[in-house]
Amino acid sequence: MLGLISEFSKGVLLPRILTVILLFIAVELQSQSALFLLISPVTSLNGMGEIGVGLPYEDHGSVYYNPANGFINSSSLSGSESSMRTKWLPGLVDDMVLEHDHFRVSYALSQYPLRFNLHQYETYLDAGLQQYTDANGLSLGTFQTWFKANALVLAAQYTGTVQKIPLDISLGIASKQIKQHLTDEDHANNVVFDRGFLIGVPLKLKLKNDLMLNLEPSVGMSTVNIGSSVVFNKGEQEDPLPTAARAGVGITASVPLSEKWNLFQYRAGNAAMDILEEPRTSGDQPIEYQKGLGDIKFYKHVIMSDPDEDPERGHDVVITRGHELSFLDVFSIRFGDHVDIAGKVVTPQSGISYNSQGLLSLAYYMTNIHLIDVINRHVEISYSYAEWTAGDTHPLSGTNFESWNVTVKDIFGINNSLQSTSSPTALKLKDAIAFSLGVNYPLSEEGGSGPENTWQKSAGYTAGVETDLKYFRLGFSLTQSSFAYDDEDFWEGFLRADVRDEVYQLALNAQVPFTVGNRITLLGGLQVQSPLLHRKVTLFDQTIDVTSYEYNYGLRAGAEVKIVEYFSLRGSYSYWQQDIESLFNADQKVKLSGFVVEGLIKL
């Protein structure tokens, strides 16, 4: 990338100009240096809203958001390694590269409920070849510009009870050596620090046949990039660091089939970040930082994930939120979004992962080959992919991340695993879990501007999993509602598949069952929509992903007929209280209530 993107003043390069242009970080900044520290290099969490500050996550990259995160369930010594390399700002330039290499060692004490993590990672941003000029436009030559951070992270976790409340409490600190190389004569070295804590409350609810529902709400906070001002070697100007406060909450829900194998797992979280530098009107003013969480309002920004419209305070807070759904520890799907309040820009994120743990667990259960179990207990390999959706003219357009992660677990227990003669755990799934798959038929229509310009509802799909608790049935589902464009003048009444609005809802419902005879069950209860609502709008040859954050609630009622022992049919009416905005008709609303017909397969 060759461009005239910086200038000299009294012979001193103004590094912040280059950095702001190169990084295009989506927060309102004054004049920070080392902005590359705000680029998230974690593939898995980049697909689900970068919510690692408050959600316990085993990916060692989660320490980027909170040095107290990144613990794995291992009973002795473990190690893991991953690497990532991707083009940065591909919508703007073609020669910027972001690299991230990470190594972790974890050790769990056998006599005490303590674990320790030691991480070493390096983040490197190659900004390409830059051409510099002086104030008169004369060329000063070309230089290779790059930025690097080398980090060491130390964290400890306590797992136990406090006043009979189960807790996972972790604390972490990080030290990062920062190098910024703008030209051969203009470079800076700094040492910065991170600190953070993370608290989870692991709960266990008993289901049928000795299955358990594990729930863990969590909260975390961190302050990152704490240090002295940046002074390049000519020393005529100081620039502040991008010192930032982060806060987040999370929830993890899973149904384990065995100690290390989950039937499914759902994770979600909200987070907020605020740059702590106090606003300055000139470079002569002293550099000062806010304390604590800065402009973050915990209830508004974190709990409710609500953008702050106050123009005086909170305008530079960045909000992120995301979800992950995993099946049999084999496949995970993620989505989330990154909300820049100042710029009023929402960047949708999505991603997937494949994991060897679930595949080998399934293979061992089916074959009873002992070696498969030994490998699975001590080696885990995963592949992750994430992408950010931005407009064609946005610098982030085309940004994606890809990485492999290799973990060797419980090294001291390998010999015991080789000598073990255990068999696969019997899966007690009968009557405990049911999978649902069906058709969703919305009742409302998006209004148009005239009789020849209307939106017609069309059938969508729904899929979910549910289980019977003591007094009610708990279900989790993904539902799609679809609306297509009907233009009678040109398409003779046929629905146009190339112009449509699709809405995707994640919902949790709790229904009370009433049995009538041997085959009929009546159900009724409450349902709550996951706050993250995803929409996909197709306009001819373009597809636009839109993510909004809208709480919704309602009622669900229906009847279920048992056809055979393990299969039933169910019809329900799903009512949602809140309407959503029509993306095609600004003055109209869309209600997602409708009829649902499902087939249920019980395990």
Image (cartoon, grey):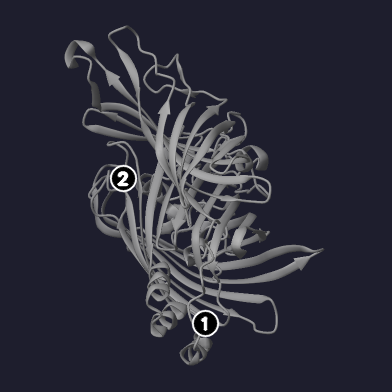
Determine which residue is flagged by label 2: 5
Q: Residue 554 appears at what percent x and percent y?
A: 59, 30
| Residue 410 circle label | 1
Q: Nearer the viewer, mark 2 or mark 1?
A: 1
Query: Dot 1, how many residues are within 10 Å of its Cα: few (below 14), some (14-19), or many (20+)?
Result: many
Which residue lies at the image location 27% right of the left edge and 48% below the top edge? 90
Residue placed furthest toward the right:
163
Q: Amino acid at mark 2?
A: Ile
Which residue lies at the image location 47% right of the left edge and 26% below the top edge? 592
Q: Residue 583 appears at what percent x and percent y?
A: 39, 23
Q: Amino acid at mark 1?
A: Asp
Q: Residue 557 appears at what percent x and percent y?
A: 57, 32
Query: Dot 2, how many residues are within 10 Å of its Cα: few (below 14), some (14-19), or many (20+)?
Result: some
Which residue lies at the image location 52% right of the left edge and 71% below the top edge? 260
Relative to 448, does residue 340 appear above or below in the rendering? below
Residue toward you, 427 or 190: 427
**Helix or strand or loop: what does disc 2 sit on?**
loop
Which residue lies at the image location 53% right of the left edge and 34% below the top edge? 559
